[in-house]
Amino acid sequence: MKNIKYTYITLTVLIVMLFSACQSLDDYEPIYSLEGEIAIADESSAELALTGVYMSFLSPYGEGFPQFFILPYFLSGAGSQSIYGSYDSAESRSYIDNQPLDSETSIAKGGYASLYRLVNRANWLLQEIVDVPESQFSTPSRKNEIIAEAKGLRATANFYILRTWGQFYDLNSPYGIDLRTTPSRNAEANPRSTVAQTYALIEQDLDDAIANAPDLRAKVYVNKSYAKALKAKVLLYQGKYADAAALAQEVINTSGVDFDLAPTYNELFDNTNDAMFNSKELLYAVRGIDQLETTFMGSQWGGYITLNNTLLDLAASTVTVGGQTIAYDGDRISDNTTPHIGPGLYEPTKYSTYFTPYEMIYHLRMAEVYLIAAEAEARANNAVTPNALANLNAVRKRAGATTTGGDGFETYPSSITYTQFLEAVRIEKQIELFAEMGEEWYDLIRYDYADGGFEAGFSVSDIKPSATNPDKFILPIPEESREAGGYIVEQNPSY
């Protein structure tokens, strides 16, 4: 049996190590591991290794997460630097101006390193578990489940890398990512794969997770429904609309009572008890470690970035559909924001403002699946189908929309046009998922490119005036990483 050079250690030591000094960008030795000659030889050691992969999303403050998930709000114009000045840096200003820097960064560089660190940990596990006999596991299926969970996490990380640093919107583009399927001990790099090749590996990993991941251990672990939902999202990003619609609808229809819209919107963000971690709305989420302040899971918003009043203005605005004046939102935005110090700035209260055990990053939840199904089915048919409309309105009804046919926060009527519908879905997602994973930025890019290429119809610059160069819609590969890898990884255009 091969010996693994890096073995994951107990949670107690993991927490202690979270307080240690930051790793360098291309030091891919897992933070939560120690060098040793201890092999993954049984279920216990395999589970410990898997825990190390999951812990990748809990990198210490300053090493990528959760700050990485803030970047889209700078890029889209929804977020501003905090009045406290914590993010008043050349890097943050470059995102706000849609001119990202390619060196001397911390947020982007940390996110890039942390995501590849997750991939590397998954690759160590996947390599070493192969030789462990199934007889070493408590149930015949657990070995395959561990493999499936690791692949689901690797797919998640690769998807985030692709849509941030690759031309994810163009299947014909050579600018995919550095795909890694074997573990690395150093900064070695591979030439970039194409976008199509990158999506192929992501789908392959998700197919394994769909086939073999557990139905549900807890919402903080990869499961079949999450893998299906993420694949539907990946298909949507590729423009494979019919397949995306079918798979998203399958998640809605067949995932059972454990996966559905929560009865009310605000209960998803009740930071006072453990119920939020068990909501049926969640597909996969990461919770902070109790009192471990270095994770800053939700608190990164309160002190480091604020929302602009443009989001509140959007939520309060209306659209005329078939003679009805329909409001985009009821009270989702107003109930979950509070005025910040400074004019026109607001602090999201979806997350705890202070360090508590009730903090979470929502990687994917059911409301987004409904909106994926709605958009994908409409695009697949080039028309607003009854089912597409029903999926959009299901999210609005949960938020309190009425069906009287009058004005105000109402469901959308069947008279809505195809163009109005797509815009309604985009805005609905922005309002529903605000201050979560930055979907609005990637939606702007997708909508722009889906109109026949950039600048052919809807344009990102219609919403964010400074976003005029499509090359700058994605971030540059950190120069420090390219240098460490011998410049094998080609830089993105215009950087």
Image (cartoon, helix red, strand yellow):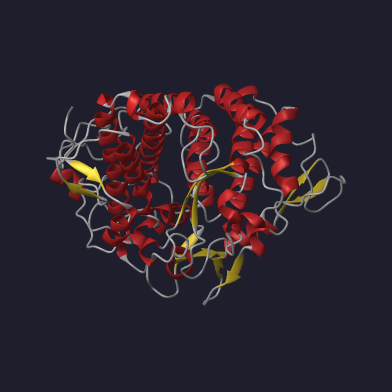
Q: Position of residue 466 (x, y in %)?
A: 44, 54
Q: Nearer the viewer, residue 191 or 131?
A: 131
Q: Is residue 223 left or right of residue 205?
A: right
Q: Quadrant of residue 168?
A: top left
> In the displayed structure, would residue 286 be above or below residue 38?
below
Q: Is residue 417 visible?
A: no
Q: Is residue 216 left or right of residue 481?
A: right
Q: Residue at x 69, y 26 (%)?
A: 383
Q: Quadrant of residue 268?
A: bottom right
Q: Is residue 314 left or right of residue 386?
A: left
Q: Quadrant of the C terminus?
A: top left
Q: Is residue 161 left or right of residue 141?
A: left
Q: Residue at x 69, y 44 (%)?
A: 395
Q: Is residue 488 visible?
A: yes
Q: Residue at x 48, y 71 (%)?
A: 354
Q: Residue at x 51, y 58 (%)?
A: 78
Q: Position of residue 174 (x, y in %)?
A: 30, 28
Q: Nearer the viewer, residue 478 or 283?
A: 283
> In the displayed structure, would residue 278 be above or below residue 349?
above
Q: Quadrant of the N terminus?
A: top left
Q: Position of residue 299 (x, y in %)?
A: 46, 65
> In the displayed structure, would residue 10 be above or below residue 124?
below
> In the displayed structure, would residue 273 be above or below residue 159?
below
Q: Nearer the viewer, residue 283 or 107?
A: 283
Q: Position of residue 320 (x, y in %)?
A: 77, 46
